Amino acid sequence: MSNAPVWQQMYKGLIIALLCVGTYGCSSVNQYDELTAQEIRLPAVSATPIEEQASIAHKPKLAIAFGGGAARGLVHLGVIKALEEAGIKADIVTGTSIGSIAAALYSSNEYADIERKIFEFNEHDIIDINFSGAGLLKGKALAEWVNKQTGYDDIQELPITTGIVATNLTQHKA
């Protein structure tokens, strides 16, 4: 049993319920039946500087797309950990919803730091309730938390090229 007052327990439960309801639309199953795997082979490195420069220019780039779905958000930690253990670092990362947070953290931190930051945060650090038709959360607190955790205020300054997918649901044009 928690030692927190009943009102705090109820508040925390309400926040969790609101987050679950608010992200329900992001929980669809991803199916990629048409995808096939292809082995990536690095070009052989030559001994001469000119050929070596040409070889580097043709090096394949690795991009990671982190998906949305709040319930699956922590799965991204496992992906990041497995990549780091294999010595693989992406050249480009993208994400949507919870995946955008994973992409920003991946671009600016090592796995151990990301794991610590994810498990140490408090819901009060990222939640700013919005009682209007514009949405359930303002999002400013979450943006400030991400900026603090990455050490960057501008996505273009992140060490790895990072793309965030977003949709403005408040303005739609015909």
Image (cartoon, rainbow, N blue to C red):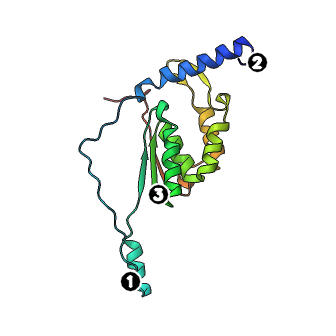
Q: Amino acid at mark 2?
A: Asn
60 or 78: nearer the eye?
78
- View extreme (top): residue: 6
Q: Residue at x 29, y 41 (%)?
A: 32
Relative placement, left or right, of 107 versus 166 is right
Q: Are marks 1 and 3 in contact (CB under 8 Å)?
A: no
Relative placement, left or right, of 101 versus 120 is left
Report the disc number at residue 118: none
Task: State whether residue 134 appears in this view.
Answer: no
**Disc 2/disc 1 C-alpha distance (Å):** 67 Å
Task: State whether residue 71 appears in this view.
Answer: yes
Q: Amino acid at mark 1?
A: Glu
Q: Which residue is mark 1?
A: 51
Q: Position of residue 163 (x, y in %)?
A: 46, 48
Q: Which residue is mark 3?
A: 90
Q: Quadrant of residue 3?
A: top right
Q: Under tag 2, what secondary structure? A: loop
**Disc 3/disc 2 C-alpha distance (Å):** 44 Å
Report the disc number at residue 3: 2
Position of residue 33 relative to residue 137, above or below, is below
Q: Position of residue 1 (x, y in %)?
A: 70, 17
